[in-house]
Image (cartoon, helix red, strand yellow):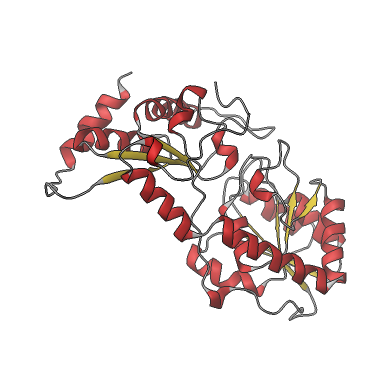
Amino acid sequence: MMLPPLVRAFVIRRLNVAFAEDEKVSVRGYGDTFAGMVASILGKHYQCKSVASIHTTHTYQPSGSSKRGKELLLSILESMARRYTHSKIDFLAPVYSPALETVPLRYHSKTHLIPNAVAVASEDVKANYQQAEKLFSLVTVGRLITGKSVLPILEAVQQTPFTTLTIIGDGPNRRLIENWIRSQRMSHRVKLVPRMENKELVTKLKNFDAFVGYTEFAEIPKTVIEAGLVGLPIVLNTPKYRLPKEYDGIAIHWVDGQPQSYAKAIGSLIDTPSDRELSGRDTREKFEILFDPDTSNKRMFQLLTAAELDMLPNHQTHNDGSNGAA
């Protein structure tokens, strides 16, 4: 495979870094494709520990998705990079349990689940669950792509009086969504925001009454984590695959992905303010424990500084009984 030598030559030629003899160094790649490949190359070059965090579940594809042309070529290159990373990296660190299953069995001994470190400032936490406006305000955040359709949510809003929806995100399906909003004359109730910086998003989430989402991917979206940490009640479609263990005991309002199911859940939240406050606060409290930055950062530090694998406290590998990737 010619890709790694080419990448190595490119990176080493352009990166000229010197470290003191007593300086402790490690390298982390955010992702197990190209970033992971570079991390493993740099780790070997500088003789230090390397780790690749895994944020995607490439073994699951939504129905109706297909790759061609540049997308197909990129997918092939990513697959090559991923195989190299899994083979050469010192550690693999999935950020949620579904990503564990993307790691081949032979690499499970160096695979450690380290949850996403997500922080929300106290001033950005939702404190008032009474509707500020006459209309119940919903928000959904994410890429407008196949497998993350907002159409069921739009149709639910259309069926539910006194609701508004803000869609934050962009993607190849944006034109489809714009056409639907226009054809259904819903522009007075639906707002499309193609782009918003994450820092601004987190500060504004508390102004909404609930977060709604739809995904066919086996994932725990960072936007869902942020909404939960803010304290918003969350409405999500039940995963096609098994429910990630991170959702165990979380007061999420699960729906079947159909507009009628979303409309029923939204209507219930509108009718029972106490329920939306209870679910919002419960989700925030449990997510604060699951995705605590101090805990995640400490586990990553321990992983990269432990002299021996057996020295790692709370050693957690892929041990949930599933088969993992082939």
In percent of width and height, residue 101 lies at 57, 32
Q: In this picture, is 67 found above or below 114?
A: above
Look at 66% across and 78% down and name the residue there.
127
Whether residue 267 appears in this view of the structure is yes
In percent of width and height, residue 275 lies at 81, 68
Look at 33% across and 18% down and name the residue there.
1
Looking at the image, which is closer to me, 225 or 12? 225
Q: How many marks?
A: 0
Q: In this picture, is 242 found above or below 326?
A: below
In percent of width and height, residue 26 lies at 28, 45
Q: Is residue 7 left or right of residue 178?
A: left
Whether residue 168 appears in this view of the structure is no
Name the image quarter holding the C terminus. top right
Q: Is residue 313 left or right of residue 43?
A: right
Look at 79% across and 75% down and name the residue there.
135
In which image quadrant can residue 240 be found?
top right
In percent of width and height, residue 293 lies at 47, 59
Looking at the image, which is closer to me, 314 or 99? 314
Residue lying at the far top in this picture: please name it: 1
Q: Is residue 153 left or right of residue 42?
A: right
Q: Is residue 163 left or right of residue 57?
A: right
In which image quadrant can residue 42 be found?
top left
Look at 66% across and 35% down and name the residue there.
62
